[in-house]
Amino acid sequence: MKRKLNVEVIKDLNKDVKVCGWVNSRRDHGKIIFIDLRDRTGLVQVVFGPNLKPESYKFSQKLRPEWVIEVLGKVQKRPKGMENPKIITGKIEIQATELKILSEAKTLPITISTDGYEINEEKRLKYRYLDLRRQRMKRNLEIRHKVIQFIRDFLIKQNFIEIETPILTKSTPEGSRDFIVPSRLYPEKFYALPQSPQQYKQMLMVAGFEKYFQIARCLRDEDLRGDRQAEHTQLDIEMAFVSQEEIIELTEKLYTNLVRNFFPKKKITKIPFIRMTHKRAMEKYKSDKPDLRKNKKDPNELAFAFITDFPMFKWHEKDKKWGAEHHPFVMPQTQDIKKIKKNPKNILAFQDDFVLNGQEIGGGSIRNTNLDVLTAIFEVLGHKKAEIKKNFKNYFEAFSYGVPPHGGIAPGIDRFLSVVLQEPNIREVIAFPKTSDNKDLMMDIPSEVTNEQLKELHIKVVKKSKQKNNI
């Protein structure tokens, strides 16, 4: 007999079924034992009584929480007055005829019957495979799945094509610090994990795909920050022959529909979403991601906004040099190279940030396809022309064969979900997150590798010498 999910058996009244799952709770009523059996879809009540085979009845007396079992039985209506309206299977129960114990379980090191907020987070992350059994975490990941599926369907209907881009790519100096990967076959050379699909999606525009998207993994070796992850997931969108306003309108339509479909109790503050220049936001709110809710005590209010006209550059006082406010591939709002080089602080960009309730949930821009202007931007950032052409030779080569004007946006999946689900941080909406200091406590990483592996990769680990205390 084929196993059925708990939620499916409500359609099988008076039929024999097979269900499998975890013992959520057990109650003894004399010679009758009641089990709440849990699977991903929820609970179903199983009754072990007179109809059970003697051997199976003996097994049922041994059952403990979190044991994994298989049950054969008949679906029947619960006795009148014994229904449970709190669960989807609350009108039925399964009269067991046969029981098989598939796996026993020790007492869990963390409770899973609560929301889990009261438990030390490091302990939750160490036992994440148990933490994910709790109802709140299941709900979060199921909503995440549905939201991503909705995004895919929405964009495909808008004639977008989903294309995967490489995970092993090239280390370039334009953004955050890269995670680098040594090459075994090419000694002393390295790959990098992608901070984003930035260069690849622009190559897809050159290739003529015009409307691309991807649910992309992005990896950045950033300094320790409380609500960041070394790896995160973003919706990556790129379009050719498009204006900044058209990108914003598409994003607005997508997220308005997402909220209406999955979070109907939420109220969007303003549609169309609020537009505000970076200068205005900083002057009025002292923030480039202002919380624009009318009532900040209302947990169901969603204040989406687009912050536009960002500066192209920002000054790093510590290093005494210019950096890109977002990234160097943004189109500046002037094509005058002399102005760009002479007055970097006055140059604005066709860049926008997507903001929700005081959180940045994405960023978009029109891309720079003028290689002379791009070169000037990198020169402002401190790069020599020869270095620029070496590091970005793919740009210079590809763009010489006909490049359409293009732009895009990359909203973060994790951040959006953490806000709408009212979670305290993005770790609550990621299946297997790292800690705030980039450790995976469940897998115990980062970890050492063997000397043989290092030798194969032509790498030598130089350990820091211990400093002697000055007395």
Image (spheres, rainbow, N blue to C red):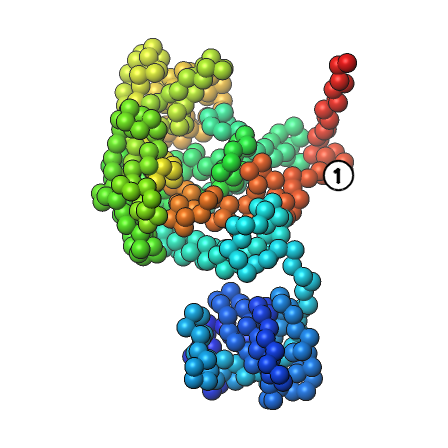
In front of the other: 98 or 145: 98
In front of the other: 148 or 432: 432
Residue found 34% across the figure and 40% down from its top: 357
- Of all residues, the one furthest to the bottom in this rendering is 50
In front of the other: 269 or 403: 269
Is 59 placed above or below 400 here? Answer: below
Residue 336 spot, x, y in % from top left = 28, 16
Say which quarter of the image contains residue 1: bottom right
Instruction: Give the class, few, some or many, for how many residues have Cα within 10 Å of label 1's Cα (few <14, many ≥20).
Output: few
Query: Hey, what amino acid is under mark 1?
Result: Thr
Residue 384 spot, x, y in % from top left = 47, 15
Q: For the C terminus, give its image quadrant.
A: top right
Is residue 428 left or right of 401 when viewed as pictured? right
Residue at the disc numbered 1 = 450
Say which quarter of the image contains residue 396: top left
Asked if one can make out residue 164 in the rendered structure from this viewpoint, the answer is yes
Residue 79 spot, x, y in % from top left = 46, 85
Is 275 placed above or below 424 here? Answer: above
Is residue 205 left or right of 268 when viewed as pictured? right
Is residue 259 left or right of 137 when viewed as pictured? left
Residue found 51% across the figure and 45% down from its top: 427
Asked if one can make out residue 159 in the rendered structure from this viewpoint, the answer is no
